[in-house]
Image (spheres, coloured by chain):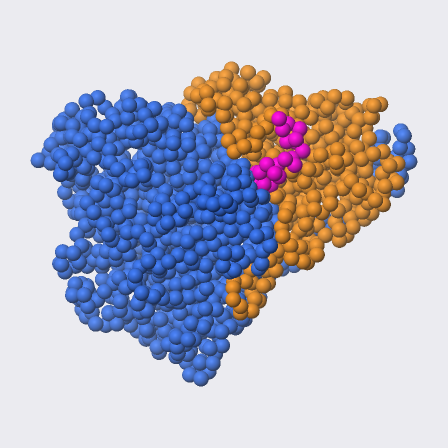
């Protein structure tokens, strides 16, 4: 060896230690003498491991091991002890993602909120007035009554200047603000926002309970987040119910559509990867080369917002090949039994002699089919009329001897019908035809016949404009027609549709579509969803393990929903609670409505009758409120406490009379009158101003009254818009966010490793616990303790300032109650237009007067109230007497206020939730099923019987994730250890869906659905922001500017805004806000990777760095969701102010069909139905900016 | 024959979702301390991409691993020992901090303490090295998911080798993830590079460690390791590297990166090998033979002669039993779907990879063929989105044959299982076409798809 000396050195190294050197000097084998390893052994040592989880809005619900050493949290790793999913499938372990693994960074990070803070200028005014006046409420009132003082602290919001205060001072000022608002304006001027109870049920419930006890308003989140698929209540009569991720394994064909599973469902992605090895075929629809495309057998790179066209074309292929060319027996059998396809629809004659589909034929909410067996019309059981009629046992899907005919073909003449189309520059119509039948003088056809006409599937002998074949590019909805819209080759669309249906036929319905925000969060996301849902419903996949829709968008299933609901809305003390549709609330109170440059008829169909013509969206919201369709908060232009005092013994008549006379008005008719403003707003478990607030700059300007980057012009002509509506903005958090920066009081919250709570998700069937690894450090407190503290301060002040008052609550017409029959045939009759006196609970909201003992709020917060003893629980129409559980809780938790079960500790609340819910208490589940059995006449209770004696306790949840019990709270079954899939109980036990027909609906016959042209599934393209708002057209506009679609998909490095400020996540990514753009678009405006750019539209401005990538499609940028302004956001070139968050470029657009109510499945329930805060139709101008940035 | 035991890992890249959980849990447990801010014992690279530290695979530049001399012996690429002895005080061939990345933080406190002003407070980035304001221009994972596009990806040393076959435009984008830890090589060039003899390979399980007492901070190991998986702690002045979580392994627990892998793609098991055969196998002339050469040093634990020799060498019985249940053995030797990373570095790495199937089959789609038809499927493997040449450059020194064989087996498994899934008659010709029996194919399917915890990690506890 030439290098002998080096060799000698190495050998010497080996000789002086107890180790073996390999003969060639190549390797050392160390035996013993490992003192030097001590460093790593020491590093890997700990005192205890605690099970907890992450209360973050991600649906993960992952169980974690939190390691603690010397009283300090060191790191976390996933638990791996989930109960088994069975020997022949993978397990749920380990569940977790990099974000969760980085969580403990927050515990001791410099962004941790350690102490209570208040806005300096405000607290100084308050201290001074408090000392002078001696009364906190008087002090607060004085500040509020002085416009200059009020303006001074409002303008300072978000501009630094927070100062440390002590807990008592912070809580006292907050309490005073609440008391003042109730006294002056009414409790409905107070609102709370905290999303997704499933992610930490008790932390949510304690605040919501406080709000509900004082008569405040809880704001919805699911619709507001645009995560609610409105199509779900429309089609299924259900909020959302989806398979657990373990059920993906059962699918043999998986279509991932607008859902980037590896990034957004990280702990569950392995099921998809592994199911491929079982021979599952995977197809991805995504505009970009998303992370899940890596797993796809086929990729359909559809243009953003074009998904509806793709789905309609696939539906065309399935209807033609599997229903017309060949009647596929399992599909036909399924749709006749479980969908509205055989139902008869009346036809309305148009002035031009053609027809339009009109209403479900039949009376009393009992629609009619044609019975082939008898050759006569028949009323199948299971409709809404059977549900709430007076014949028990009729509400089921048992067809008996009825053989519903799918089509009217051969029965009567074909007539020409006119259907809308929205694929052209201007909405148009298409003339096709349907076979008909005449019954009692009514010309009818079937939903199936209408579907074929709508989809353009011809049959011999039917006149009209029909496609000539799949290659017909002009007639909707052929594969060739969709190609220029989506960019996906027609042949691929036809093939995938065929494969999808063929797989469903071969596998018994195991074709699944995994749907996501990329499809859902558009203005017309509901119509797109209906077109997609049609694919799984037509092919008999819904209600089958391994099949159907799987919508995973912000829907964290709060499995023990009943118990949570009782606590959260204080239903044990007072009913009904005040609840509000978030989108309408913010649209109204942030004055975004003032910037609508269009009227509601822009969405109307050419086949409509002009019901939206010339009407502002606010007009429709007001109509929805006065008809009792949707809640409206604040409700009236008067303090509801005063209104209750004057209402007397018959408050309903009084209010109806006052409204009719015009002496009383709805607040939403004049939302900018100071008496109609929201006054106190509390956010906890939420970062609304850094994450979900679509139209962020409108919030800053009008709601908060601080400086903003809003660039749009008020076109309402309603005079000067108010700036600064809120008296108090209060937030609870453990880290600094845009919301805490903008708050008047910031309360330091305990983290997820510092409290007791419960956690569930739709992704797995387990319930498990939060457990403190350490006590809340510094001066932090759990949400539970904070609200109890606030309640004590509130009660002390309220006892004298408010006392015991009556409160008049206006409740909307509710889903799953007889209210859903308030609008026969979906015909809108507005008392304001007819001049009639409104009828509470029928043509206007229900009016209920309740008593509020304001001095007792703190006591009641900590005690399970007596209303539960007499009224029991009712969820989704299922009633249970829970007296055994109340007695159990007395013994488990101890009693307070005499004999009430204690809720004074967070663990007490956990036990109460577990005891009162069917999913966690077998007795409750069984009794609930018995209740449903009475109404349906079908056997159900056996589904829970295997667990009738099982009650899950909090200690069980701490020990290990516990599988939940099959319960009537949900639509699927876990009985016998099967994987959860929605609607399996409906399909297997013939329990109806909660819809008009009791079946899954393709057809929606409400007036407003017709007006929108959306009675049937249809394609509606993205909104044209050039036409609506005068934004530049898409494409280049000038040398160095380009207008692009602006999408905000979810990021790999954060869960909403959570973790986007986490140093570990920032280190693994680009270290701050970035916008992804295609190489082609970047080249057009001469932007290179990592250069600073600005994105501007009328709503605001974003400053960030560019990530240039060939994975992006030309014409679209991604600014990943919830990149807020706290990390590395410089000032904008365009106005010299701090750049905005992702929602600085968006604003709210309310779709009128989302505020329909009082009609069958189109009836309100909280977070169940309401307008979505959609944001994906937006565009933005991008340009390269100066690379010298200032902060 | 000198039997030794090696704890080894296989990662199934076909299942990797690129989530980086492994990196974070490893970082949190081992390297979130000063001096190693920039260090990721476990990192995940997007491929194509430059890697971490960037371009580390360019051995012309970084001089890692071994080269075979004309006489058929191995010497470190960075030069003979004299050369390295003389350059001991000035080691120029080493990534600079900027090749890893300059670690940074933010002035988070400002969010809480900002005085009343005219605009929203913001936390600016600050260098963790200088404490000064900085603009972030590179990170441990800068080109994640094809970020940076062509401008950045042109720096991928592997892509350069195959660039004429690979097109980068949008429609043909391809992507997979490559998680990396220390390879705990049978023939570690880091140990051979260390002038202090501080790097050693544990006799009982082959884990390669740096003796923290003995390390003098020469950093020759950083140069010597072709994977750049030895790091310099600039606070202690010592080298540090992945320890294969030996305090966990010794009590039968998997490494942190494995247990926390939500893609469930990591397998840990024992491999018995003939220590006497390593040097010769690492020095075979043709790089394409290195894959088979390394396999040839592995000893069949079911072979009675091997078991006997192992016992004689002091390997405990339960370790031999564990070697027989080793998922790593099955994936490397039985099913032949796992491949070594860069065998051409001649270090005999012991973290192996199942190549990603990336089954976007454009060619088939465009011609309208049924991708499920097994006959098409085999043809399809050559038409995968990820170019075969790229994978071969990573795993087989450029020889596409073993990669193709592995991918064909995965593809055949899907086709075979699909029929069973749909309740149709199993087609025995499918496993036969890839040289497997239906039973073997079913076992492989269960190991790759169902893979319970106890099957993924077969780790015998240490004997005190």
Farthest bottom residue in view: A132
- Res. A796 visible in picture: no
Indicate left or right for A519 with B286 as reference: left
Q: Quadrant of the C terminus of chain A?
A: bottom right
Question: Up-down: is A109 above or below A983?
Answer: below
Question: Up-down: is A986 above or below A226?
Answer: above
Figure quadrant of residue A306: top left
Give the total number of marks visible in the rendering: 0
Which residue sits at x=82%, y=47%? B216
Indicate left or right for B38 with A1027 as reference: right
Query: Observer-nearest residue: B188 or B157?
Result: B157
Residue A129 placement (x, y as % from top left): 44, 81
Q: Quadrant of the N terminus of chain A?
A: top right
Which residue sits at x=52%, y=38%? A1080
Indicate left or right for B373 with A897 as reference: right
- Res. A463 visible in picture: yes
Figure quadrant of residue A566: bottom left
Residue A524 placement (x, y as % from top left): 34, 43
Residue B439 placement (x, y as % from top left): 54, 21
Q: Colour of chain A?
A: blue
A236 in the magenta segment? no
Query: Observer-nearest residue: A931 or A337?
Result: A337
Q: Tell me the magenta residue range.
A: B143-164
Chain ID, orange in image: B
Farthest front residue in view: A1039
Which residue sits at x=65%, y=57%? B133
Which residue sits at x=42%, y=83%? A133
B151 in the magenta segment? yes
Residue A871 placement (x, y as % from top left): 28, 58
Question: Up-down: is B200 above or below A223?
Answer: above
Of helix, strand and loop, which mostly describes the magenta segment?
helix
């Amino acid at each position: 060896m030439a290098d002998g000396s080096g060799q000698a050195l190495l050998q010497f190294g080996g000789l002086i230690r107890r180790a073996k050197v390999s003969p060639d000097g190549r390797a050392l084998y160390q035996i013993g003498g490992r003192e030097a390893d001590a460093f790593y052994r020491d590093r890997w040592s700990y005192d205890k491991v605690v099970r907890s989880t992450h209360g973050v809005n991600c649906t993960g619900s992952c169980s974690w091991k939190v390691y603690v050493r010397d009283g300090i949290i060191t790191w976390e790793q996933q638990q791996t002890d989930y109960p088994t999913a069975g020997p022949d499938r993978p397990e749920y372990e380990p569940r977790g993602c990099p974000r969760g693994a980085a969580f403990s960074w927050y515990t001791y990070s410099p962004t941790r909120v350690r102490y209570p803070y208040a806005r300096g200028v405000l607290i100084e005014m308050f201290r001074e007035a408090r000392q002078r006046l001696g009364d906190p409420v008087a002090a607060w009132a004085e500040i509020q009554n002085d416009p200059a003082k009020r303006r001074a602290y409002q303008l300072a919001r978000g501009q630094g200047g927070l100062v440390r205060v002590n807990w008592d001072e912070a809580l006292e000022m907050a309490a005073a603000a609440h008391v003042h608002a109730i006294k002056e304006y009414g409790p409905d001027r107070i609102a709370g926002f905290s999303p997704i109870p499933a992610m930490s049920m008790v932390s949510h419930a304690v605040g919501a309970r406080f709000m509900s006890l004082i008569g405040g308003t809880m704001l919805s989140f699911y619709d507001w987040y645009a995560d609610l698929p409105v199509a779900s209540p429309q089609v299924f009569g259900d909020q959302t119910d989806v398979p657990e991720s373990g059920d993906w394994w059962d699918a043999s064909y998986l279509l991932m559509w607008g859902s980037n599973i590896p990034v957004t469902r990280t702990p569950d992605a392995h099921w998809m990867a592994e199911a491929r090895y079982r021979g599952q075929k995977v197809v991805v629809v995504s505009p970009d080369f998303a992370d899940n495309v890596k797993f796809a057998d086929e990729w359909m790179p559809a243009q953003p917002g074009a998904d509806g066209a793709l789905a309609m074309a696939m539906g065309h292929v399935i209807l033609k090949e599997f229903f017309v060319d060949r009647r596929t027996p399992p599909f036909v059998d399924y749709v006749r039994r479980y969908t509205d396809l055989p139902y008869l629809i009346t036809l309305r004659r148009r002035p031009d002699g053609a027809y339009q589909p009109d209403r479900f034929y039949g009376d009393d909410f009992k629609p009619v089919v044609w019975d082939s067996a008898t050759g006569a019309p028949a009323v199948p059981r299971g409709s809404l009329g059977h549900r709430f009629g007076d014949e028990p046992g009729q509400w089921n899907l048992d067809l008996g001897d009825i053989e519903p005919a799918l089509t009217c073909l051969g029965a009567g003449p074909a007539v020409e019908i006119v259907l809308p189309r929205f694929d052209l520059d201007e909405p148009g119509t298409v003339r096709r035809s349907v076979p008909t039948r005449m019954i009692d003088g009514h010309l009818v056809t079937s939903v199936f016949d209408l579907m074929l006409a709508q989809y353009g599937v011809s049959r011999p002998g039917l006149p009209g404009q029909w496609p000539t074949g799949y290659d017909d590019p002009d007639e909707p909805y052929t594969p060739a027609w969709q190609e220029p819209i989506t960019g996906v080759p027609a042949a691929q669309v036809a093939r995938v549709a065929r494969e999808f249906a063929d797989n469903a036929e071969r596998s018994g319905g195991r074709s699944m579509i995994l749907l996501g925000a990329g499809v859902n969060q558009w203005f017309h996301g509901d119509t797109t969803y209906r077109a997609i849902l049609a694919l799984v419903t037509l092919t008999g996949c819904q209600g089958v393990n391994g099949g159907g829709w799987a919508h995973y968008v912000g829907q964290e299933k709060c499995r023990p929903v009943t118990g949570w609901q009782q606590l959260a809305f204080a239903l044990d003390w007072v009913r009904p609670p005040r609840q509000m549709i978030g989108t309408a609330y913010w649209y109204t109170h942030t004055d975004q409505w003032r910037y609508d440059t269009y009227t509601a008829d822009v969405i109307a169909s050419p086949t409509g009758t002009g019901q939206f013509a010339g009407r502002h969206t606010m007009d429709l919201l007001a109509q929805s409120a006065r008809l009792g369709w949707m809640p409206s908060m604040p409700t009236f232009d008067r303090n509801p406490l005063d209104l209750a005092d004057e209402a007397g013994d018959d408050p309903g008549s009084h209010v109806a009379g006052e409204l009719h006379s015009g002496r009383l008005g709805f607040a939403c008719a004049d939302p900018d009158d100071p008496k109609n403003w929201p006054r106190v707003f509390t956010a906890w478990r939420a970062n609304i101003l850094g994450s979900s607030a679509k139209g962020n700059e409108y919030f800053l300007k009008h709601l908060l009254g601080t400086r903003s980057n809003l660039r749009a012009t008020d076109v309402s002509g309603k005079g000067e818009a108010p700036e600064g509506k809120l008296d108090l903005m209060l937030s609870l958090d453990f880290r600094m966010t845009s919301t805490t920066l903008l708050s008047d009081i910031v309360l330091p919250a305990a983290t997820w490793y510092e409290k007791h709570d419960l956690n569930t998700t739709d992704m797995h069937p387990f319930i498990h616990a939060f457990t403190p690894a350490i006590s809340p450090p510094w001066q932090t407190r759990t949400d539970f303790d904070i609200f109890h503290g606030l309640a004590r301060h509130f009660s002390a002040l309220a006892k004298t300032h408010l006392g015991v008052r009556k409160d008049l609550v206006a409740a909307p017409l509710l889903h799953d109650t007889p209210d859903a029959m308030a609008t026969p045939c979906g015909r809108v009759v507005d008392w304001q237009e007819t001049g009639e006196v409104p009828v509470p609970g029928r043509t206007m909201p229900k009016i209920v007067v309740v008593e509020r003992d304001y001095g007792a709020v703190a006591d009641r917060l900590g005690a399970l109230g007596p209303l539960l003893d007499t009224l029991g629980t009712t969820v989704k129409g299922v009633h249970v007497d829970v007296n055994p559980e109340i007695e159990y809780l007395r013994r488990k938790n101890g009693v307070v206020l005499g004999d009430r079960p204690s809720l004074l500790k967070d663990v007490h609340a956990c036990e109460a939730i577990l005891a009162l819910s069917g999913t966690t208490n077998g007795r409750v589940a069984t009794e609930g099923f018995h209740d449903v059995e009475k109404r349906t006449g079908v056997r159900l209770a056996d589904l829970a019987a295997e667990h009738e004696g099982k009650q899950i306790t909090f200690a069980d949840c701490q020990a290990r994730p516990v599988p939940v019990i099959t319960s009537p709270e949900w639509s699927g079954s876990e009985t016998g250890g099967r994987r959860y899939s929605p609607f399996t109980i409906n399909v297997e036990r013939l329990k109806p869906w909660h819809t008009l027909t009791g079946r899954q609906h393709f057809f929606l016959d409400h007036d407003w659905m017709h007006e929108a042209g959306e009675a049937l599934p249809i394609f509606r393209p993205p909104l044209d922001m050039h036409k609506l708002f005068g934004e530049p057209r898409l494409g280049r506009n000038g040398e160095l500017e380009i207008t692009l679609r602006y999408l905000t998909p979810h990021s790999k490095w954060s869960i909403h805004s959570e973790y986007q400020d986490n140093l570990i996540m920032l280190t693994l990514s680009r270290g701050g806000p970035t916008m992804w753009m295609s190489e082609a678009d970047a080249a057009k405006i001469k932007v290179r990777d990592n250069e600073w750019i600005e994105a501007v539209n009328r709503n605001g401005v974003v400053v960030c760095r560019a990530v240039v990538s060939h994975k992006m499609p030309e014409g679209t940028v991604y600014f990943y969701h919830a990149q807020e302004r706290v990390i590395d956001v410089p000032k904008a070139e365009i106005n010299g102010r701090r750049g905005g968050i992702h929602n600085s470029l968006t604003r709210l657009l309310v779709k009128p069909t989302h505020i329909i109510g009082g009609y069958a499945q189109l009836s309100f329930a909280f977070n169940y139905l309401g307008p979505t805060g959609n944001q994906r139709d937006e565009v933005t101008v991008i340009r390269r900016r100066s690379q010298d940035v200032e902060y | 024959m000198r039997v030794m035991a090696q704890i080894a890992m296989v990662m199934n890249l076909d299942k990797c979702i690129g989530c980086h959980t492994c990196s974070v849990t490893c970082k949190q447990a081992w390297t979130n301390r000063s001096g190693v801010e920039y260090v990721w014992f476990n990192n995940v690279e997007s491929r194509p991409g430059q890697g971490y530290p960037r371009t580390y695979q360019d051995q012309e530049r970084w001089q890692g691993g071994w080269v075979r001399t004309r006489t058929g012996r191995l010497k470190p690429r960075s030069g003979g020992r004299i050369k390295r002895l003389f350059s001991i005080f000035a080691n120029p061939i080493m990534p600079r901090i900027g090749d890893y990345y300059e670690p940074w933080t933010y002035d988070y406190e400002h969010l809480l303490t900002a005085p009343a002003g005219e605009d929203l407070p913001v936390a600016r980035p600050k260098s963790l090295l200088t404490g000064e304001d900085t603009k972030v221009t590179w990170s441990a994972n800068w080109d994640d998911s094809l970020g940076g596009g062509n401008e950045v990806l042109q720096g991928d040393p592997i892509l350069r080798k195959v660039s004429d076959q690979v097109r980068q435009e949008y429609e043909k984008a391809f992507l997979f993830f490559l998680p990396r830890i220390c390879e705990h090589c049978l023939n570690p060039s880091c140990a051979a590079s260390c002038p202090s003899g501080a790097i050693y390979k544990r006799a009982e399980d082959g884990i390669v460690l740096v003796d923290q007492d003995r390390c003098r901070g020469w950093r020759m190991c950083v140069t010597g390791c072709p994977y750049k998986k030895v790091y310099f702690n600039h606070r202690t002045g010592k080298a540090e590297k992945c320890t294969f979580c030996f305090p966990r392994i010794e009590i039968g627990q998997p490494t942190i990166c494995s247990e926390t892998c939500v893609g469930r793609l990591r397998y840990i098991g024992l491999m018995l090998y003939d220590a006497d055969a390593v040097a010769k196998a690492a020095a075979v002339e043709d790089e394409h033979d290195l894959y088979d050469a390394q396999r040839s040093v592995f000893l069949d634990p079911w072979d009675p002669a091997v078991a006997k020799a192992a016992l004689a060498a002091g390997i405990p019985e339960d370790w031999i039993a564990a070697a027989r249940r080793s998922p790593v053995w099955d994936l490397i030797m039985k099913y032949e779907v796992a491949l070594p990373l860069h065998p051409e570095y001649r270090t005999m790495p012991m973290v192996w990879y199942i190549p990603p199937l990336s089954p976007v089959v454009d060619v088939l789609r465009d011609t309208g063929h049924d991708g499920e038809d097994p006959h098409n499927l085999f043809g399809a493997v050559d038409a995968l989105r990820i170019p075969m040449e790229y994978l071969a450059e990573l795993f087989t020194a450029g020889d596409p044959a073993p990669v193709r064989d592995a991918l064909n087996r995965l593809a055949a498994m899907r086709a075979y299982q699909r029929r069973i899934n749909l309740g149709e008659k199993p087609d025995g010709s499918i496993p036969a076409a890839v040289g497997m029996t239906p039973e073997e194919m079913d076992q492989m399917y269960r190991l790759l798809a169902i893979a319970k915890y106890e099957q993924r990690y077969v780790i015998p506890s240490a004997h005190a």
